[in-house]
Amino acid sequence: MVLSDPREILTVADAILHDSTPVHVHFVMFVPALMGHANEEQQAKWLSDALTMKIIGSYAQTELGHGTFIRGLETQATYDPEREEFVLHTPNLSSIKWWPGSLGKTANHAIVLAQLYTKGKCYGIHPFMVQIRSMEDHTPLPGITVGEIGPKMGMRAADNGFLKLDNVRIPRENMLMKNAQVTKEGDYVKPASDKLNYGTMVFVRVLLLDMFAFNIARACTIAIRYSAVRRQSEITPGQGECQILDYQAQQYKLFPLLGLCHALRGMFANLMELYKQANQDLEQGNLQALPELHAISSGLKAFCSEMAAKGIETCRLACGGHGFLLISGLPRLYATTVAACTYEGENTVMYLQLARYLLKCLAQPNLVSNRSAFHFLLEPSTLNVTPFNAKLKGQAAIRQLIPFYRAAAYKHVHRAHKKVRSLVSTGLTQEVAWNQSQVDLIIASRATIYYYMGLNYLDWLEHAAISEQLRDVLMRVCHLYLLHGIYEQPGLFLVAGLRDENLEEISGIITELLKSLRPDAVALVDAFDHHDMVLCSALGSYDGRVYERMYESALKAPLNKTQVHESYHRFLGPLMKSSL
């Protein structure tokens, strides 16, 4: 088998290692950063070797003392015009690079983010290509202190490392100069726009959406297959134990997550298209779409990682005690996904980045194009929602929910905007007012992304090239997903035209949807087509041999290699025979 696609490489490596891979960051961060920040000459020098893994790279941004607040990074890159070199230095303990994947023992190069100094002036954060290990024997180069940071909650094989730089010199040409440059004389040439750095960040967030969709689909496959095998108690006395998938509570836990799987997959496709279009515009010098795309991707990264992590934990709980075993495959999926709530932008900060853009849309409406995803925030008619009609069927029943999501987003964004302005009017500075409004701002961002995802999910399904029979089933999953979002968070929607009596009607519709989806549940997860090696789960294997696999795995456990463990002879036996 020949693997040429980095995604294929990472998927196969995941199936073999049953963990994250030490080259994940190389493909997901290092290579895209070269493509996004290196000029043509630099790409000719490094990109081919990176793609063929002749060099293996890390992306060294986060420091011991700073993470999401990139402007606060302390690593320095000072230009020396006499030798035409940059001197990279971590001046104190908190400036040591900390957390970059692939860095600990794998990478021989790193793109290091550092504060650029030239002619006595700081020009902010810029990327630099730094060789950190010998290409001959892999030992650290002079001035480099590098290693692995130690055990973590998950992602044990990600090779997260630390990097200390002691006045390490690199050629001037090792500053990635596609956007900004420093001349031989030390003059700084600023980029055409500070928005140019958005491209790489958006691309990484696109890839994250793909990972979230992949992970939650695997978790749903495991939990639903297990629920079809597991029998527990009786619904009707005397009729025998039934599959736990027949219990409504189990269906309510798991079936809406099928909708999340599809919503994430549709959102990935949507965001990838937006990114491609923005990239084409960027090549032509048009930067107008980048700020909104950056805001959308920030909100999506936060919301989708949060929902995927919660969804995987729900799947684990739905499998009872067996879901707690590592052989269920669920703890690993959870650890991998929940980590993404922090890396590539901590979620709270990501929500607030989106909120800042949303409030900017309200403050400067002339900058919001008619094609903007957020133009609805400028339309008071958004609140004119047709009352909920429980008698509607089919796509009409689903389509009527979108205006409620849109009105909820409108209401909460305007409420947060009003609170910030009210606090400013009392004499508080804009910054303090913002800090005292963060809870409302995050709610506004979540409501906006909830609407954006629901709208795109339904649109994706309506235009999918599939049979009408399949569309009918997938539409029911979508209907359940959207109703579940309202039923679980009524507070978001009661301010947007929904009434208390509507919640009772929604409860009845959800009950019917759960019953109608029960016969298709296993087929829906089988359709994800995840190989047993990729699932790596005794609970979710295609053949349904749950208990056999669990018992076989237990017999192979290290502690069962001998009937009497050495600890008995060393500790337990002497204790039992003592006169204590």
Image (tube, rainbow, N blue to C red):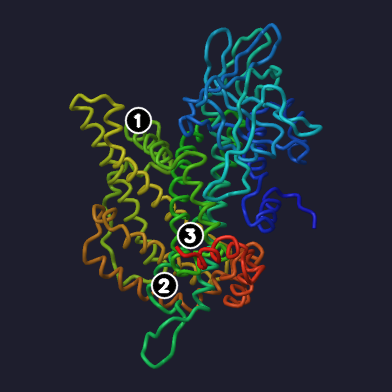
On residue 364, which mark appears? Answer: 1
How far separated are the C-alphas under marks 3 and 2? 14 Å
- Write down the residue under mark 3: 312
Q: Please state which of the two labelled residues, at mark 1 or mark 2, is closer to the viewer.
A: 2
| Element at label 2 | helix
Which amino acid is tagged 3?
Ile
What percent of the width, then of the height, locates residue 37? 63, 29
- Give me the residue at 18% from left, 27% from top: 426
Residue reaching furthest front? 579
Q: As shown in the figure, which amino acid type bears the numbered disc 2?
A: Gln
Q: Decide if residue 58 is on the left or right side of residue 216.
A: right
Q: Position of residue 157 (x, y in %)?
A: 63, 48
Q: Are discs 1 and 2 less than 8 Å apart at CB?
A: no
For marks 1 and 2, the one nearer the N-term is 2
Q: CA distance from mark 1 to mark 2?
A: 47 Å
Q: Quarter-wise, where is residue 161 in the image?
A: top right
Q: Which residue is mark 2?
A: 250
In the picture, residue 562 is in which quadrant? Answer: bottom right
Q: Nearer the viewer, residue 378 or 153?
A: 153
List x then y, in percent, for residue 12.
Answer: 69, 56
